[in-house]
Amino acid sequence: MCGICGKLVEGEGAEAAVTEPLLRAMSGRMVHRGPDGEGVLVRHYRDRSIGLGHRRLSIIDLTTKESDLEDIFLMMTQDHEA
């Protein structure tokens, strides 16, 4: 089973409250949910900050895939097995 985590902060101090090291630490706490890959994305916009992270567990598709997250106008995290 894969794992996802995230944090959304609005208002003053939002940028300082959502950081890549924080999301990597959150993702690291659930390494048992997915030791085969990790992805983290942090974005700041005006007075809002959002961070998403996920862990990948390979069950069906055992090929090595990058577990990166990208955004254009939309942020999302996914389970590569689906």
Image (cartoon, helix red, strand yellow):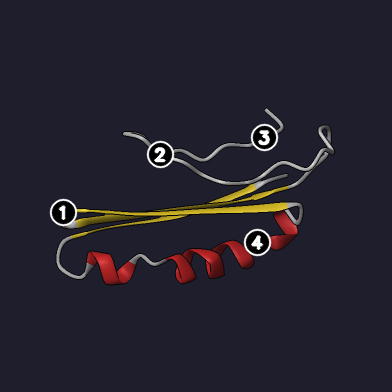
Residue 63 image position (x, y, % from top left): 82, 38
State if disc 3 and disc 4 touch (CB < 8 Å). no
Looking at the picture, which amino acid does disc 1 mark? Arg
Report the residue marked by disc 2.
Answer: 71
Q: Earlier in the sequence, mark 2 or mark 3?
A: 2
Q: Quadrant of the N terminus?
A: top right
Determine the secondary structure under disc 3.
Answer: loop
Q: Earlier in the sequence, mark 4 or mark 1?
A: 4
Report the residue marked by disc 3.
Answer: 80
Q: Earlier in the sequence, mark 1 or mark 2?
A: 1
Of the two numbered discs 4 and 3 in the rendering, the one whose residue sits closer to the viewer: 3
Of the two numbered discs 4 and 1 in the rendering, the one whose residue sits closer to the viewer: 1
Looking at the picture, which amino acid does disc 3 mark? His
| Numbered circles on residues, count | 4
Q: Residues within 10 Å of mark 4 (few under 14, many from 20)?
A: some
Residue displayed at 40% across by 39% down: 71
Report the residue marked by disc 1.
Answer: 46
